[in-house]
Image (spheres, rainbow, N blue to C red):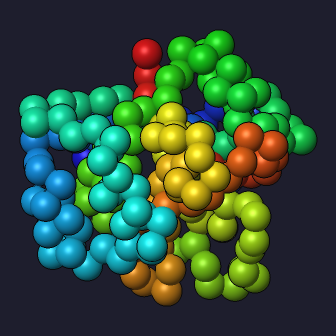
Amino acid sequence: MNGDTVDDGSTTDSDRRVTKRTVGAGGMTPAQLLTELERCGVQLNDAARTLLACPQFPWSPEWYELSTVELSVRDLGLANGAGISEVRAKAAAIGLLAPPIELAPHMRLQYLDQPEGSLGFPATQHRAPPGSLTIVSAPLSEADDVPKGFYLRRIEGMLWLRGYMSGPDHIWDAGDRLVFVEA
């Protein structure tokens, strides 16, 4: 996976950077993907396991590549944070779309040098944890008991693919880092 950080020049704050990467996905069965995650030492929470086992989870038999864009909610012009509908609308207005949900486990396998995100930060609840990258894919189900998507994180040196629960009323913080794909 190759990545380029693009500084928009407006500030030196780390939340004001945009990172572009080419990420490959597809070409693996669910069992092969889970085996590869395990081989690479990637940890999964229960919500991630639930998503990966979901019968609606789309698996592409063919390998493909996508151009991803990582940015903060603030970079979308939402300095006070926003709900997911507004976040997606702002992203779409600049040519960014929700990635397929299968991108997240593949991105986790390819982005092995993610910086540490937990040391020195208090635990969070009801918001994205420090250092996490949320893959802004469409949820598989609107049901309250089905996780809505994935985020990537490094916790005390361990790489994680974590699923998350989030309702439509959740307000994403301006500093939360999100991953979209270019249209």
Asked if residue 60 is positioned above or below residue 128 in the image, the reply reads above
Please indicate whether residue 153 sits to the left or right of residue 110 in the image: right
Q: Where is residue 80 in the image (x, y as percent from the top left)?
A: 89, 41
Please indicate whether residue 81 sits to the left or right of residue 47 in the image: right
Asked if residue 119 is positioned above or below residue 176 in the image, the reply reads below
Please indicate whether residue 90 sits to the left or right of residue 110 in the image: right
Q: Where is residue 41 in the image (x, y as percent from the top left)?
A: 25, 79
Q: Position of residue 159 (x, y in %)?
A: 38, 74
* Foreground of the two, 66 or 102: 102
In this rendering, does residue 57 appear at all? yes
Q: Where is residue 135 in the image (x, y as percent from the top left)?
A: 49, 45
The residue at the point 18 percent across, 54 percent down is: 30
The part of the image, by quadrant, that contains residue 25 is top left
Asked if residue 182 is positioned above or below residue 159 in the image, the reply reads above
Asked if residue 32 is positioned above or below residue 107 in the image, the reply reads below
The residue at the point 49 percent across, 86 percent down is: 156
Total labels: the figure holds 0
The residue at the point 75 percent across, 82 percent down is: 122
The residue at the point 42 percent across, 33 percent down is: 99
* Residue positioned most to the right: 80
The part of the image, by quadrant, that contains residue 78 is top right
